[in-house]
Image (cartoon, rainbow, N blue to C red):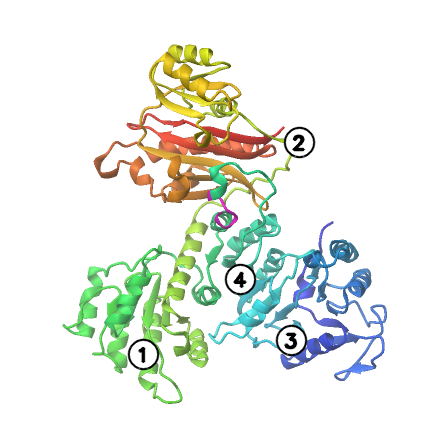
Amino acid sequence: MTQRSLDRLIRPRTIAVFGGREARRVIEQCDRMGFAGEIWPVHPTQESVLGRRCYRSVAGLPDAPDAAFVGVNRTLTVDIVRDLAARGAGGAVCYASGFSEAVAELTDGADLQRALVEAAGTMPIVGPNCYGMINGLDGALLWPDQHGIVRTERGVAILTQSSNIAINLSMQRRGLPISYLMTAGNQAQTGLSDLARAVLEDRRVTAVGLHIEGFGDIRALEALAIRARELKKPVVALKVGKSEQAQRATVSHTASLAGSDAVADAVLNRLGIGRVATLPELIETLKLLHVAGPLESDAISSMSCSGGEASLMADAAVGRTIEFRALKPEQLPALRASLGPMVTLSNPLDYHTFVWGDLARQTEAFSAMFAGGYALNLLVLDFPREDRCDGADWMITVSAVAAAAKQTGAIAGILATLPENMPEAIAEQLFQAGIVPLCGISEALAAADVASGIADAWRKPQPLPLVNASIAEGEVETLNEAAAKAELTAAGLAVPRGHTAATANEAAGCAEQLGFPVALKALGVEHKSDVGAVKLNLWDRNAVRDAAEGMAAVARGFLVERMVDRPIAELIVGAVRDPVVGLTLTVGAGGILVELLEDSVVLPLPVTKAEVLERISRLKVRKLIEGYRGGAASSLEIVADAVLSAAEYVVTNAAHLEELDINPLMVLAESRGVVAADALIRRRR
């Protein structure tokens, strides 16, 4: 069933409200924001609400409303939604709780939610268990409480699953213009991504911020990312929590590395959706994106009249992709001329106080810095308390920044190190001048990091759609190592030369055929080293036989392999099934220290070789592969080819595969390739 457009719901001209106290509050909030459309209260006994005639039912309304706020009990909600859908309404917000989010307390919660979705049919519904939405552009609210939104002509949209988080964000005093504030509740029918796609189409929306507790429909998130890229409107997400793990007996190291948060990070990165860690970072990033959009590079500049502030800025960039790139030679003469001989010219730059209060010289200095081709130019400036101090000289600095930005065409931001030192009125004034008002050093640099990352993602080819294979039915089985390696060999991966044997004597005979030294492994054992089911560097027949007899009690046959030459690096390559995203590939430092080192990356599937190379180049173990301190070397190209073979195996078998774990994948010196020394595959029969 195809859902109708959300346009009428989010930009209504007529609103119907159902219920008592909450419905009255919706009308109050619409009146306060100057909603110009009609509001139709519906109540079984009241004659009027706030000067508006009350209607008794959906059937009695003058027309099908564009939007409805349904603030009644959960069972009556279903009936009203059914009537609205039949009348041809544009959509409804379902305020009541007691649906799927409350199954632990109410046994009929899930059934009632299914009934609600069925009653809605193709009519969009938001919720249940949500506050609804605020359209700050048109003053239209389906919102039963106080909020801090003011009318704006253009701004960012913020969407969250949490009504309380939405209220908190609406109360921000950082000057951020908010065009839409929406909550999605438990997303029975319409999810965050659906709402976000709808608001993206509004030309007055500049960027979108998501507060995500758990991924819902991953296909809708993909569609949102594609549309955002087409419209050049960036999306940034605050993803919290860990998605529910599938009920499966995970036995691989891969599963411990590819936790749901790592998968979420990889998916957002692939889709070009920026990720922030805190609500202040979300606000500051949206402020930057509202003014500047994605930053065209990771090079930024900083100026302050304090060496202490310059040091704080430099330190805060450590560990981030942004760079305080050195000044260009052509910038130096103008900076020296405006700042004088006593200032050390660098980036971040402490311009001292020699030009403080001097509009002309400040403009010259700032223009010289802004002419350096930086993606973002920051001026650190904490404003004084308005109740005790005179801020006239600070406003001279603001004027100089505005003049320099206009003269050079550069993107500029004024950064207060403490949020309370950026008054809301000044922040709004800076927005009007096209200057980004930023609060907090770490938050501002996080915003720059995210904004440059989005631009970098958009410069790359559109990623392939994520694997969307239905999971086959059938019991999950674990292949023994020999069978698993046979599968990988067919997929193009190299494995050690080896034979299987049923008895200790057969194992000894296989060893002689292969040539010593050999490795002996018990088949049918998942964590071999834990139970003594693997022996390495066996040099004669007797040693192989004795070793086989020693592990016979746990073995269901034996695998005898030629020992692999000492590798220059050991990797892990594996796949696990995330309950929302599906199968993803993990690559990292492997061997016995895999979980201790925690040096890994997650690759959503399918993946290209270019994407593999880009991701594995971030690994610390890369240094070993490329020859650490003059040591033996291989190449990332060879490793990428092996990883790509594993990825293609996973994609091909996506309907049946539950887990793949290659650990270690041994990288051999002198470009002699890679060898899968151990492998585990779990799949459905």
Instruction: Judge left or right: residue 335 versus residue 417.
Output: left
Name the residue carrying label 1.
397
Up the image or down, 500 lies above or below 332; here it is above
Query: What is the CA distance from the residue labelled 2 to the residue labelled 3?
Result: 50 Å
Dot 3: within a 10 Å radius of its alpha carbon, few (fewer than 14), some, or many (20 or more) residues?
A: some
Name the residue carrying label 4.
208
State which mark lies toward you, 1 or 3.
Answer: 3
Image disc number at residue 474: 2
State which mark lies toward you, 3 or 4.
Answer: 3
Dot 2: within a 10 Å radius of its alpha carbon, few (fewer than 14), some, or many (20 or more) residues?
A: few
Mark 4: amino acid: Val
Q: Nearer the viewer, residue 477 or 376?
A: 477
Which circle's residue, 1 or 4, is located before the other in the chain? Answer: 4
Q: In the rendered structure, which segment of residues is drawn in magenta?
A: 257-262
Which circle's residue, 4 or 2, is located before the other in the chain? Answer: 4
Residue 367 pos. (x, y %): 28, 70
Quadrant in the picture for residue 10: bottom right
Are dots 2 and 1 in contact, CB under 8 Å? no
- Dot 4: what SS? strand
Up the image or down, 468 lies above or below 62; here it is above
Name the residue carrying label 3.
145
